Image (cartoon, rainbow, N blue to C red):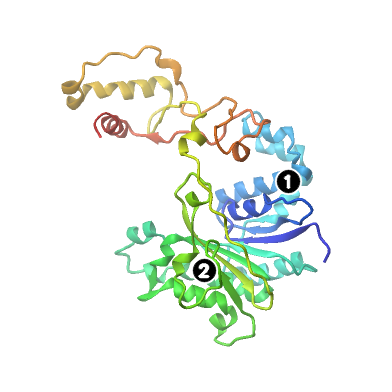
Amino acid sequence: MSTKYYPVIDLFAGPGGLGEGFSSVKRKNQCGFKSIVAIEEDEHAHQTLHLRHFIRDFKGGRIPKAYYEYVAGEITLEQLKKLHPKQWAAAAESALRISLGKQNHDKVRSLLTGRLKGHDKWVLVGGPPCQAYSLVGRSRRANDPNFEKDEKHLLYREYLKIIIDHRPPVFVMENVKGLLSAKVAGKPVIKKILADLSRPKAAISGKSNGLSYRLFSFTERGELTEEVSPSSFVVRAEEYGVPQARHRMLILGIRSDLQIEPEILRKKKAPSVMEVLDDLPPIRSGISKEEDNFSTWWEAVSSVRDESWFRNAFTYRSIPGKNRMPSNRASREPTRPKAMSSWFVDPRQKYLSGHEARSHMRSDLHRYRFSSLFA
């Protein structure tokens, strides 16, 4: 089917990070990617997913003024919807809140078949919920007798069933690094998942239907073999230009009847965190379990002088100009950081979203004060 884009279907989409990445790829005289279906169960993640699909529905990246007014808190979400009902309705058709699993499998199969009609070049992306695989999740539930029965261990089987139903030419599966060491019933999870992804029909029914996939890493050349360590699927973001030590497993599957040899990511030195964040304005921490305002915060921070460890070490003096940081969130126009400006700077955005401090109890603020002075 002739098209100006390759469709993307995003399962277990969360707020839409994988789909966002695909949609941002733009190359001259080449097809881009468009997320035609993204499915997420969590209410709050779906709200973000819906809003991002709404933004991407404006042609040529011409985001309306009303969106920036909404981000700045000048209009409500309902007002934004009323100003652009066509785009909001289109986003509701592509960003779907559905629980993936046995109970909705037939519904999802019918939905995807309808959306993919006529397309033979498309991408399936997504990652099953990873709490059960993560190192933190496993440590929290180390003594839980029901841990290994948690259905989140096996939600990747729904991903397999969708692969069987729709035979995507390419898929990308993402998960946490903890998957490398996770075990179910004493057996490594990763080995089973890789074998299942290679032959999904055999994994589900025990019988092959001829559908198979070659698996590739994004960082090392060559198809997966038994001799290749599963750790080769780990992508370390800081090695590819991102100032964050974020490590994720990314598995690229290519249907075996397609003679495609993928390229790998090119390494690039990441800028420092300071180079990216040095333009952010100072903000104060928030106060939890009390009314949050500057006076309360200042009294809480100042009361550290009553602690014996502070009295013994310092002579307390008030700080002039204390009203320089009245808020626990930024409200001014963002400036231009030293690095990665093209990633972060939108000249039309006059409100700096996302730069907001966590709230803390007084006792925690005192602990942080102690650490900043003596650690």
Residue 32 image label = none
In space, the residues marked 1 and 2 are separated at their CA atoms by 30 Å
Q: Quadrant of residue 188?
A: bottom left
Q: Quadrant of the N terminus?
A: bottom right
In front here: 265 or 17? 265
Residue at image mark 2: 155
**In percent of the image, x 61 and y 40: which residue is there?**
343
Tag 2: residue type? Leu
**For residue 81, which quarter of the picture?**
top right
Q: Residue at x 58, y 30 (%)?
A: 336
Q: Is residue 269 above or below residue 36?
A: above
Name the residue carrying label 1. 88
Q: Is residue 102 visible?
A: no
Name, please, the residue furthest toward the right: 2
Could you say where residue 215 lies in the image, as x and y percent from the top left? 56, 72
Residue 177 in percent (x, y) is at: 44, 60
Q: Are marks 1 and 2 in contact (CB under 8 Å)?
A: no
Percent from the top left, x then y, of residue 352?
57, 31
